């Protein structure tokens, strides 16, 4: 499956995705555009699935993507146990309508 390029170079896109994932895990809810949210969903699911494993290797794999150690600690200590019984689908995307100015479709992304 091809990923959306979002009009950015690969390094910029990867950095932006890291920042959005970190923000979502820190705040548990963010507002962003719909194409970004669709990319975000897959990455957040990967991070939570790794955190549910809970071993040292999984923690190190998450740390290669999320650079904020406080967020990683929250992911492993608070969020992973919360989703222990859930098989996937950790995020909810709620459409909010077009953004004023450029009419980009805005959504609210939150952890279920």
Image (spheres, helix red, strand yellow):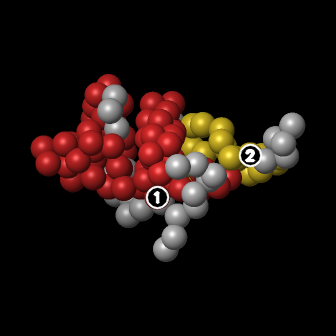
Residue 73 in the image: x percent, y percent?
A: 28, 31
Q: Report which residue position mark 1 lands on.
A: 42
Which residue lies at the image location 85% right of the left edge and 46% below the top edge?
A: 103
Q: Which residue is outermost to the front? A: 9
Choose between 74 and 60: the one closer to the eye.
Answer: 60
Q: Earlier in the sequence, mark 2 or mark 1?
A: 1
Q: Describe the element under mark 2 as helix, strand or loop.
A: strand
Residue 93 in the image: x percent, y percent?
A: 63, 52
Choose between 40 and 77: the one closer to the eye.
Answer: 40
Query: Marks 2/1: CA distance?
Result: 18 Å
Q: Is residue 71 left or right of residue 57?
A: right
Q: Image quadrant of residue 102?
A: top right
Q: Is residue 34 left or right of residue 1?
A: right
Q: How many marks?
A: 2
Q: Which residue is outermost to the left? A: 56
Which residue lies at the image location 27% right of the left edge and 52% below the top edge?
A: 50
- From this view, report whether residue 70 is shown above or below residue 72: above
Q: Is residue 65 left or right of residue 45?
A: left
Which residue lies at the image location 58% right of the left edge and 61% below the top edge?
A: 4
Q: Which residue is outermost to the top? A: 70
The reply to whether the C-beta atoms of the residues labelled 2 and 1 are less than 8 Å apart is: no
Q: Describe the element under mark 1 as helix, strand or loop.
A: helix
Density class for disc 1 (Cα within 10 Å; few <14, some 14-19, many ≥20) is some
Choose between 86 and 108: the one closer to the eye.
Answer: 108
- From this view, report whether residue 7 is shown above or below residue 3: above
Q: Report which residue position mark 2 lands on.
A: 106
Q: Is residue 110 visible?
A: yes
Residue 16 in the image: x percent, y percent?
A: 51, 40
Residue 38 in the image: x percent, y percent?
A: 58, 57
Which residue lies at the image location 58% right of the left edge and 49% below the top edge?
A: 8
Q: Is residue 21 visible?
A: no
Density class for disc 2 (Cα within 10 Å; few <14, some 14-19, many ≥20) is many
């Amino acid at each position: 499956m091809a990923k959306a390029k979002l009009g950015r170079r690969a390094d910029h896109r990867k950095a932006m995705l890291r920042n959005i994932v970190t923000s979502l895990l820190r705040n548990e809810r963010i507002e962003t555009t719909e194409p970004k949210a669709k990319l975000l969903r897959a990455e957040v699911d990967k991070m939570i699935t790794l955190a549910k494993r809970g071993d040292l290797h999984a923690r190190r794999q998450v740390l290669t993507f999320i650079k904020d150690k406080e967020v990683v600690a929250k992911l492993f200590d608070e969020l992973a146990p919360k989703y222990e019984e859930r098989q996937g689908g950790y995020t909810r995307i709620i459409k909010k309508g077009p953004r004023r100015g450029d009419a980009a479709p805005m959504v609210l992304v939150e952890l279920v």
